[in-house]
Image (cartoon, rainbow, N blue to C red):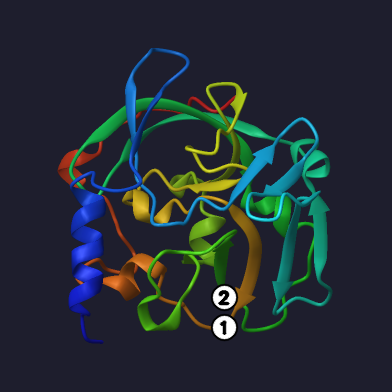
Amino acid sequence: MANHPGMTRLLTAVLLGIGAVALGVNASGGRRFPTRTVESDIFEFDPDSGTILWKETGDSEPFFLTIHGMVEETVKLGYRELVGLPATTQVVDFHCVEGWTIPDVSWTGLRFEVLLALVTPLPGADYVTFHALGETRAKPMDQGWYRESFRLSDLLDPGQRILLASHMDGEPLSKQRGAPLRVIAPLRLAYKSIKFVHRIEFTDTMNPGWWTLANPVYDIDANVPSPRLRPRPGTDDA
């Protein structure tokens, strides 16, 4: 898979903080939390009403999470339904591919087994691809929106501590943090923690994510190097 020079320039700009970069504040500690995004700013999300506002047209619509692909029946869940499901809160470190880490971030969301209980995967559906709302400014390999894939076994592994998060530090995710929903995978570099999730697709293949398609030097698994991981005895799940 060849690396496109224009894509390298885009990724370099993002990594250096040029372009659509903002600094957020963590509500619990006032820490600066850099925002990195490759998406165009074309929508807003209102957690109170659970609606998406499309900036260009001014139209709004209810948000739905669609679970589809290799399942017996497609399921669509509204935002209120999602936040009403049994949730988990965990405090974990957030590791960026740039080398910085934000320690002890509190996320609240759904373990994947909660979502899995709502669908019946077909035989061979061993992988899951998450798809983001909106569109990216560049389209590596004609991939025009952000996506990321995981092995189903990893999503169900308690040791991986992967969440589909709706809240950070007790508050609904802001747009900067990935509203309405984002994946939090604390043992993976942050490009796996896809923001703006609106579709979950069961597949029989591991689809390379947008970031990996854009520059194959970033591998599909994105495991955090072991020296960056802090030992966490026991569990801090609530």
Look at the image and tell me in which quarter the C terminus lies: top right
Residue occupied by mark 2: 126
Q: Which mark is residue 204?
A: 1
Q: Residue furthest front?
A: 57
Frontmost residue, 138 versus 187: 138
- Residue 89 visible: yes
Look at the image and tell me in which quarter the N terminus lies: bottom left
Number of residues whose C-alpha sits closer than 10 Å to that of mark 2, classed few (under 14), some (14–19) or many (20 or more): some
Residue at 81% in and 39% down: 80
Position in image of residue 149 (x %, y %): 48, 68
Q: Residue furthest top?
A: 29
Q: Can you say whether 231 is above or below 222 in the image?
A: above
N-terminal-most mark, 1 or 2: 2
Position in image of residue 158 (x %, y %): 52, 46
Q: Are marks 1 and 2 in contact (CB under 8 Å)?
A: yes
Position in image of residue 132 (x %, y %): 56, 60
CA separation in Å, label 1 and label 2 = 6 Å
